[in-house]
Image: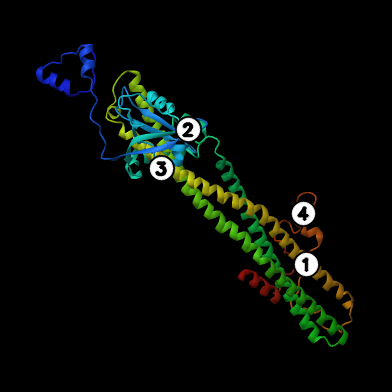
Amino acid sequence: MSYHYPHASLVQALHRHAYYYEPLSRSEEDDNMLYYGEDQMGLKITTGSVTIHKDDKTNMIGISIGGGAPNCPCLYIVQIFDNTPAAKDSTLQSGDEITAVNNQSVKGKTKVEVAKLIQAVKGDVTIGYNKLHAEASQGKSLDIILKKVKHRLVENLSSSTADALGLSRAILCNDSLVKKLAELEKTETMYRGMVHHLTRLLRAYLDLLRVVKMFAECFAQIGVREPQPRASLAFTQFADFHRNIEKKGLDMVKQLKPVLGDLGTYLFKAVPDTKLTIGKYADTKFEYLSFCLKVKELDDEEFNYASVQEPLYRVETGNYEYRLILRCRQEARMKFAQLRSDVQVKMELLDNKHVQDVATQLQKFSKGLAEFYDNIHQLTQENEGLFPVEVDLTDNAFIYEHSFETLPPDEDNPDEDGGTTSGGGGDNNAGGADIEYGTDEDLLVCRNLLDDE
């Protein structure tokens, strides 16, 4: 007994036999085996023809064909290969139905027969087709969206983990961008560390220059109040020496600050812009892989039904669902290829800028520091003969307003037996005068300056 999906003859037989089904004989079944009417799923179809000049070397136009007898009433294009006559002509697309070859109808023929028919033609071949007008939104079902999410998750998993979880996915073999993306992450980390280090270095120089400025002010005050002319001149020149150091240092910082700007442009503008393009590329990549996986699932479904000789509704009605997915896959592939090309161009530009710019900026930075050190060395040599000098001290010069106590070395450090400071383990200041720390106004000013920074 053979069972198949209801068609016209079977419905009539059921009307004749209201309460039971009478099996058909083999010959009667073959005679009454008719295809369903085509289910176009609301897609628009237009008819046309195109003449394509075949490749002189391969004698092919560069398409793969699917469908056809005995299961499908339509012969359709599965894929257009790159850099082939059909791809260069760009009239035929995946999912289009082939109706004729050189005005010879292909209705009822198998895909192998149609392929041989095309190969038998020399030179130009005319292909009659039914154009499938489909939008990408029509193929983006919930299944495709879930597949995109799955591919996005699997992207961060190892193959063994994905296999253990039973996650089916489509992958790109020999994807060179994966390695370049890893290199971009390392380059970004290196730039971030470099900018952070150079910024801290310049800030340290600014802090040092503030201290030098304070020294200059102190020595200038000493020079003004010093009654000895020679000592006053020496302290005044020594103050000018510190002011010149500060001036040279500020010039050096102003000269090197653009280096941080150039490195920051690469880090905070070029890299994020490339990452934004990579994000769009990744979304398109996952969409393309989702359509590839969907095509594979539909192929497996068709193969399984054919292996048990069972009809499949979508195949017998023109396989429009499959052809719609083929068209969406082709459009996603074209978009993916375009974005991939953009990413590769930006990655190449970043690599060239990285190779050329890093060495130039570091040389500029080191040159600026070297010039600063040379200037300091020259200033130091010019002021070598300032000291020693004679100064007049008052009788109370070494009498301070606050007294300080200095602990002996043996009381400041633990003894050899592992004990603490002397005093029986009590307060370190026991038995002695209370220590009162003085306040240095200049030190407070310096500390406030650092806090402001």
Q: Amino acid at mark 3?
A: Glu
Residue labelled with disc 3: 331
Q: Position of residue 280 (x, y in %)?
A: 46, 49
Question: What quarter of the picture does the N terminus occupy?
Answer: top left
User: In what element is the residue under mark 4?
Assistant: loop
Residue extending furthest toward the front: 123
Q: Nearer the viewer, residue 201 or 404?
A: 201
Image quarter of residue 328? top left
Label 1: how many residues lie within 10 Å, few (<14), some (14-19) or many (20+)?
few
Residue labelled with disc 2: 162
Residue labelled with disc 1: 371
Q: Residue at x 60, y 57 (%)?
A: 266
Residue labelled with disc 4: 414
Q: Amino acid at mark 2?
A: Ala
Q: Nearer the viewer, mark 2 or mark 3?
A: 3
Q: Residue at x 89, y 80 (%)?
A: 389
Residue 219 against residue 46 in the figure, above or below: below
